[in-house]
Structure formats: structure tokens, C-alpha cells
Image: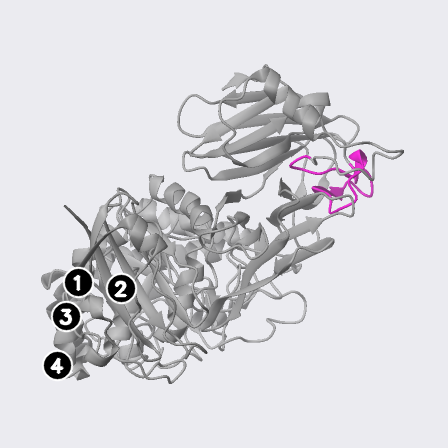
Amino acid sequence: MTPSTTPVVHLRRAGTSVVVSLTDARLPRILHWGADLGAVGDDELAAIERATAPTIGDSAVTYPQPVPIVPQLAEGWLGRPGVAGSRDGRAWAPLFRAVGARVDDTAGAAVLEVDGVDPESELALTVELRLEPSGLLRTRATLRNDGAPYRVDALELTLPVPETAEELLDLTGRWAHERVPQRHPFPIGAWVRESRGGKPGLDAPTMLVAGRPAFGFRDGEVWGVHLGWSGNQMLAAERTPAGTRVLRGGELLLPAELVLDSGEKYRTPWLYGACGTGLDAMSAQVHRFLRARPEHPAAPRPVLVNTWEAVYFDHDPARLIALADRSAELGAERFVVDDGWFLGRRDDTTSLGDWTVDPRVWPDGLEPLAERVRELGMQFGLWVEPEMVNLDSELARAHPEWVFDAGHGPGLPSRHQHVLDLGHDEAYRHVFERVSALVGALRVDYLKWDHNRFLTDAGHTPEGRPGVRTQTLRAHRMMRELREAHPGLEIESCASGGGRIDLGVLEHTDRVWPSDCNDPHERIDIQRWTGLLLPPELQGTHIGAETSHTTRRVAPLAFRAATVLWGHLGVEADLTRVDEREFAELRAWVAAHRELRPLLHSGDVVHADTAPEVRLEGVVAADGSEALFQFAVLARPAAWPPARLRFPGLDPERRYRVEELAVTAVVPDDQRPPWMASPLVLPGRVLAETGIEAPSLDVDRSVLLRLTGAA
């Protein structure tokens, strides 16, 4: 990196511009984050700063100033301060002055680093911005203490949005009903979303988005942020009466959880920012960034069979070997043994923490099953929950001091379990060695890593001080060290379904489990909104039983399979009890997925803005040569037939052949519009603007439409 020689820096990548002011020895202030401004010269950049400077009345506190990425009370910022903390009641309002800046704009990401110091507070701060080749912006800060111990209460980063961003969108939810969107106007004040359970949670906002009123997937400028952190956290949208609007985020620290000794540093998690015209363009910046990472899964995502909804805790070697045999016949490429394999684990009330294969159930160990799975040409996977413990376990009885306790005992159980404090070095080594030994002995290819209890009272014994931050860091460390010890090992982040979905855990894992709900009526939107952040190949998607185990809703196989076809596909049903007709249909869907996988896991994800009762979404190849869409009806619209199907994301100049992809069932004759009698060929521009008539489907039914470039 080279020292910056200009007072205003312009970073450009992939249609995005970030203009940053470094004047007046202040911390970096973003003057523009959004659409590309083109090749702007230094004089023009200086003019942009002048043009965007507000009129100052009689008080600098009340004008709508461009605030630094780390806002400061001492500069007149009346919102949440970027740095909150003190040294025994002193240095609680630091004033950092910039003393140096460095830029690297030669290749890859465009990077700006700015150093600030506050000699009076004996603190130093470095702020880093990276505009990635995909157009994704990410920023973080590092705080250094140069004096007596300094208690850090918060270090939060902000990204500005313009006054046109008048509406907010984020997500909420609950178990088996995750990622439910909620929208409302951008109010004066702060809209704050906090996660205090030691993980983002089932109700996590995932991304907090601000945009033009009524923005959709294809229209309206939007700006969104996400915090890449797996522990306690906050995202907020803040608007001042003076007109300043920012999106912000940071780690949520518990009392005295982070105290820096002299010379120690604290580096924040990355705050990710994406923008574009419509949610699809915003998400594409994140998806392309993730796909470009060196650690992004390179091999085709293996179709798996998971044993949970097939056998639950009812483990029997002969039954599971039969299930493995049937899985190989299906075309599965990975077989995952879920909960129930370890010592005494016949239900969820006991034995978490005792990571020893139960000899009463598995007298010869799991080795024969693992070997059989490999003989059948599949990978072997295993469920674990390394951060958790049942009080009814050999581990808890031997080491009660390893269970979190904030001063009132181990606290309320959740799913009969408590949290094992990995902040104890001995506890960490015990769990790591047990899990690592299993991975080595069984040659495990894949760990389904669960996390079912919130860290509501996570006190590190014996003194009871907060242990959430250390727990998060130790969990990431264990994942990293397991992968280092066992090259090729893949890990799934599963936390009661979708409770730990963030770009921090995805530095150490290869997929997430968005929800424990396999009901396609629910799952279609769980996947849609998880897709704000993650591309399909990082989302586990399973074909469940005809009757959903979570909602009791009944759905035909064609709807179940078409809805989950897009992601990292799995099957979660007892294949030994499936009749031959349904088994053949399942096999056809697995084969279809494996054929389409190169497109589904590399193309651009697109969504049409439709009436709320229907969905039209799909994946378009990066070069526009082909696409696959699903049209689904989730409720009876007030008006019928629904609006024409207008396909987003196509090459407007290319001609496409449009036809039904009927894997196991076709749309009934009385629901087929005339064009479905034979393949239709139209230019992408016509398919996007004029559209085609929609089939008259029943509720909870869908059709797949394949588009291929035509001569």
C-alpha cells in the first residue's frame, strides 16, 4: 500500500463508487456510496466535497454533516457514538485525529486504511475500507490502547445512505419459520436490532436494508448491511433530525467483557455493505464476493441423505446400513448420521458432551457403517453439537465447572441442554480431541455442527464474568483447527435450523442450514430471504416427507422437490419405507439436480416482483445462455389468472426457447395456457417486458420453466 496523496479518495469496482473525504485530519467520511461516478479527477473530487458540504448555522452540532465511519461525540455527533468505553470513568469521549492514510488500488479489492490517534485518551484507531471486485464494500476498525486498562463497551461502524432511502427492510422469525421480512418507513431516531443469545438467532435481521419507497427485487435503489459475526451483535438504521441517515453495526459487548491492557488491540468484525438497483443487484454483490473467496467450496455440492427425519433417535446398525444402501441407489453422494449415535443418547434429555459411540447400539462401532457408506461411493457425515452439554451426562457430572454459570447455577434448560464453556482451556481441549479423534477414526468427510441453546446467562466460572465473546471466538477456532487437522473436512453451520447464519461462521464452514422446516410452502420464502445474503450452493435444502414434520402440511413430491432443487440438495426421509413409484420419482429429481447443478450454483439469482400470492424466481447463467425458473402459487389470488410471467435477468438480445421442465409430473391439461403445447421461442427483451401467460396452478403447486438460448 502507498500513502494517500489526495484529500478525497475515489474507490471504484463493478459499477460501484465510494468517495471518501480525508480532509481536516478527520477520520474517513464517505461522501458517496452507490452507483459508479465514472473517472473523476482530483479537482472534481474536491468539488464533490464542496458540493456536498452542508450550510452551517450557529451550531456545528445541528447541521447534517457527513459523519465519519466511526462517529465521535467530541465532533458533535448526537447519535450512538462509534467508540464507547472508559478508563475508570476517563477517556469516554475520545477525539481521534487522522495522522496517515494508505491506498492500494492496483488490483483485486480497492483498499483504504486510515490511522487516527487521540494522545489525550491514550488510544489509537485504524479504519479499513475494502471495495471488493464484486462491488461489495466492507469495513472494520482496530482500536489500540496505549494507557492503563481500557474497558471497551462498543466499537460500531457506520455507512451513510442518502435522503432518498426512506424505507427499511429487515428479517425476523422463529423456529421453523425463519427469515420473515418486515418493512416500515425510516424514522427519525434509531431502528435497532440486537441479538443477545450468543448467535445471530432465528429472528436475526440477516441484512438491514434501506431504500427508495416500495423498492423491490428489480427496482428502486437499495443499500444493505450485514455484520460478519457469530455472537452477540447489533444492526441499526439511524436518522437524525438534521437529515443524516446511516446504517451501522457492531459486536454487542456485555459488561466488562472486553478490557484492553496497555498495548492490546481489538479488531471489529467486518461490516459488509452492498447496494444496487433492486434487492437482486444488492445480493449479487455479496454472492459474487463469496464465490470468489479461496475457501468457497470448489467441488460440486454432493447430494446427501440425512438420517434425522428418517430415524430420529431410533438407531440400529442394520436399519442404517439398509438406509445407506437405499441412499446410494437414489444417487446420493453423501450419507449423514444425525443425532442419536453417542453414549446413552436415546432422546434429547441426556448425554450431550459424551462424544463416544454407544456400544449398546453400535457394538462394533460406527466403522462398519462408515466403511459401507464409502463402499457405496458416498462420503460419510456425522452430527455433533460441540458447544453444548446435558446436565445428565458423564461430562457434566465430572466437570460441572465447565457449564456456564452467571451466579445462579446453570440457568434455564433449553431443549434439556446447557452450554459448555469453551473458555476453559481444558474443556476446549477435551471437546476438540474427542471430535477430532472421531473424524480421524471414521474418516468423516462432513460435520453437521448444531447449536441449540441461546447463551442467555453465559458466565465463565468461577467468577461468573461474561463469556459470550470468548465462546464465539473459541467455536470459530475449533472449526478452523478441525479443518486444519483434517484437510478436506467440510462443516455445516446448523443452529436450531437457521440460528447462526453469518459471514463470520462462513469463513470456517461450507454451508448453512436455513431452517428445520422442510415444508415447501414455508421453505420457498425461507430460502428466498436467506438468499439476500447467501447464494444457493451455501444453503442446505432437503426434500422432506409428504407430511411435514414441523407443520403437518401435506405436499406432493413435485412441489417439495422443485422448491429445494436450487440449493445444496439433500433428502430427509426414510427411504427404506418409500414405495418403488415414489423412490423412482425421487431418483429422477436427484438426477435432475445433478444435471442442473453447474447452472444453479454459478448463475445469478433473480426474482420477479409479483403479487404476494405467487412467486417467480430462478437462476440465470452468468453469460445469459440459459436459465431455470420456478413459478409457484402459495395462496388464491383475489384476481385470476395471475399477471403474466415476466422473466428478469435475461440477455435482452438473445432468443430463448421456453419449455416446461417436467421431472416427474406435468401441469394438468386444464391448467395449461396455449403456449405450453410446444416450446416457445422469444427474445429475452420480450420475455422480460411482455411476458407469457401463467399456468392456472392450484395452491401449493409449481412448475419449472427451462430457458435455453436458441439460434
Residue 357 vs residue 290, the one in the foreground:
290
Q: Are marks 2 and 1 in contact (CB under 8 Å)?
A: yes
Query: Reading the chain from its start, which is encountered first: label 4 or label 1?
Result: 4
According to the picture, the residue beneath numbered tag 1 turns out to be: 592
Q: Hey, what amino acid is under mark 2?
A: Leu
Q: Hey, what amino acid is under mark 3?
A: Arg
Please tell me whether residue 116 is drawn above or below residue 464 in the rendered image. above
Location of the C terminus (image quadrant): top left
From where the camera sits, is residue 225 visible?
yes
According to the picture, the residue beneath numbered tag 3 turns out to be: 587
- Residue under the image location 29 percent in, 62 percent down: 692
Q: CA distance from mark 3 to mark 1?
A: 9 Å
According to the picture, the residue beneath numbered tag 2 turns out to be: 565
Quarter-wise, where is residue 443 in the image?
bottom left
Whether residue 15 sits left or right of residue 114 in the image: it is left
Query: Reading the chain from its start, which is encountered first: label 2 or label 1?
Result: 2
* Residue 72 belongs to the span the image colors magenta: yes
Q: Position of residue 408 (x, y in %)?
A: 67, 71
According to the picture, the residue beneath numbered tag 4 turns out to be: 581
Magenta range: 68-93
Q: Are marks 4 and 1 in contact (CB under 8 Å)?
A: no
Quarter-wise, where is residue 618 in the image?
bottom left
Query: Reading the chain from its start, which is encountered first: label 4 or label 2?
Result: 2
Q: Residues within 10 Å of mark 2 (few under 14, many from 20)?
A: many
Q: Position of residue 171 (x, y in %)?
A: 53, 62
Q: CA distance from mark 2 to mark 1?
A: 8 Å
